[in-house]
């Protein structure tokens, strides 16, 4: 497991229909070593700070193995590093072998996997395909965000050394599927909430799901008590 490319971009204005939007998704590879800080990489930036960046989404990693899938799926010959808006194009870190809560030493930094990536419409802009975010999400090949536990320099060629793994062993693919495709899997939601490292936004979503389910159960019970025999 290693970094093949480190990619950054500051936000810029791009056309979107009749409007323009600001986005930092157009990442480009950088040479040498670069500082990974608590909220992002030096030289990188996010336009939408509500849904990108911050301490729980300081950097985004995407595996080169997924590039191979999309080449076949889309019939495209060439992709450039940073094609999917990732900060780290990595090798050997597919969604089925990385768990939320895994801690890695990479370069001089220590990072923790905090959540899968939920794609937004800006990925469609980047790919030139408005419907691609839905296809991307349904594929399960979504990549993952990293929380920085210790800042440090990183660069292409650095190895990801797994130093800790969450006991629940919920993979990136499983966590994404639970949130977006298994709304009735309440046991799965409870398992997700046992993952200490799960980002607050995802935690809130699962807690809300369980709260609503509990509310429905209580209403059903009350209706049964009030119903005539």
Image (cartoon, rainbow, N blue to C red):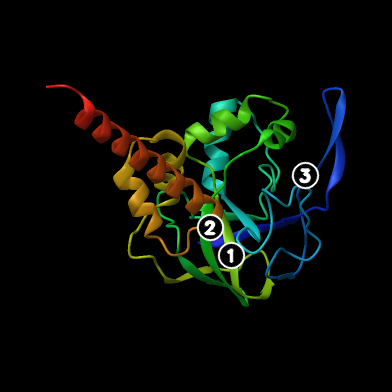
Is 69 situated above or below 196? above
Query: Which residue is depicted at the point 39% across and 35% down?
Result: 183
Q: CA distance from mark 2 to mark 3?
A: 24 Å
- Could you tell me residue 152's position as x and y percent? 67, 76
- Is disc 2 placed on a helix, strand or loop? loop
Residue occupied by mark 2:
199
Dot 1 or dot 2, earlier in sequence: 1
Element on which disc 1 rests: strand
- Residue located beneath label 3 in the image: 26
The residue depicted at 65 percent of the width and 59 percent of the height is: 59
Name the spot of residue 12 as percent of width and height, x first: 86, 45
Label 1, label 2: how far apart the Cα atoms are: 9 Å
Neighbourhood count class around disc 2 (C-alpha, 10 Å): few under 14, some 14–19, many 20 upward? many
Where is residue 41? Give x, y as percent.
73, 64
Q: Count every numbered label the image shows and give the total.
A: 3
How crowded is the residue under tag 1: few (<14 C-alpha within 10 Å), some, or many (20+)?
Answer: many
The kind of secondary structure element at disc 3 is loop
| Label 1 close to label 3 by CB (< 8 Å) | no
Report the mark closest to the observer, 2 or 3: 2
Position of 112 relative to 209 (above/below) = below
Do the residues under discs 1 and 2 have CB atoms within 8 angstroms?
yes
- Locate residue 118: give its quadrant: top right
Front of the two marks 1 and 2: 2
- Vertical order, 50 against 169 (above or below): above
Q: CA distance from mark 1 to mark 3?
A: 21 Å
Classify 10 Å Cα crowding around label 3: few (below 14), some (14-19), many (20 and above). Answer: many
- Of 222 and 170, nearer the camera is 222
- Closer to the camera, 153 or 207? 207
Looking at the image, is mark 2 or mark 3 earlier in the sequence?
Answer: 3
């Amino acid at each position: 497991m290693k970094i093949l490319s480190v990619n950054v971009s500051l936000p810029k204005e791009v056309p979107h229909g009749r409007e323009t939007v600001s986005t930092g998704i157009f990442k480009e590879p950088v040479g040498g070593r670069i500082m990974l800080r608590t909220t992002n990489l030096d030289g990188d930036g996010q336009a939408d700070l509500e849904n990108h960046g911050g301490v729980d989404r300081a950097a985004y990693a995407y595996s080169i193995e997924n590039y191979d899938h999309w080449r076949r799926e889309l019939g495209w010959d060439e992709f450039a590093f940073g094609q999917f808006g990732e900060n780290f194009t990595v090798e050997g870190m597919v969604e089925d072998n990385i768990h939320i809560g895994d801690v890695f030493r990479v370069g001089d930094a220590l990072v923790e996997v905090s959540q899968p990536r939920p794609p937004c419409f800006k990925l469609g802009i980047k790919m030139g395909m408005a419907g691609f975010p839905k296809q991307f999400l349904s594929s399960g090949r979504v990549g993952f965000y990293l929380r920085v536990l210790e800042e440090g320099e990183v660069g292409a060629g650095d190895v990801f050394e797994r130093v800790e793994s969450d006991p629940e062993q919920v993979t990136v693919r499983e966590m994404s599927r639970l949130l977006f495709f298994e709304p009735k899997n309440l046991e799965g939601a409870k398992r997700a909430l046992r993952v200490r490292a799960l980002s607050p936004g995802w935690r809130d979503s699962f807690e809300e799901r369980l709260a609503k389910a509990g509310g429905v159960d209580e209403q059903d019970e009350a209706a049964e008590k009030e119903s005539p025999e």
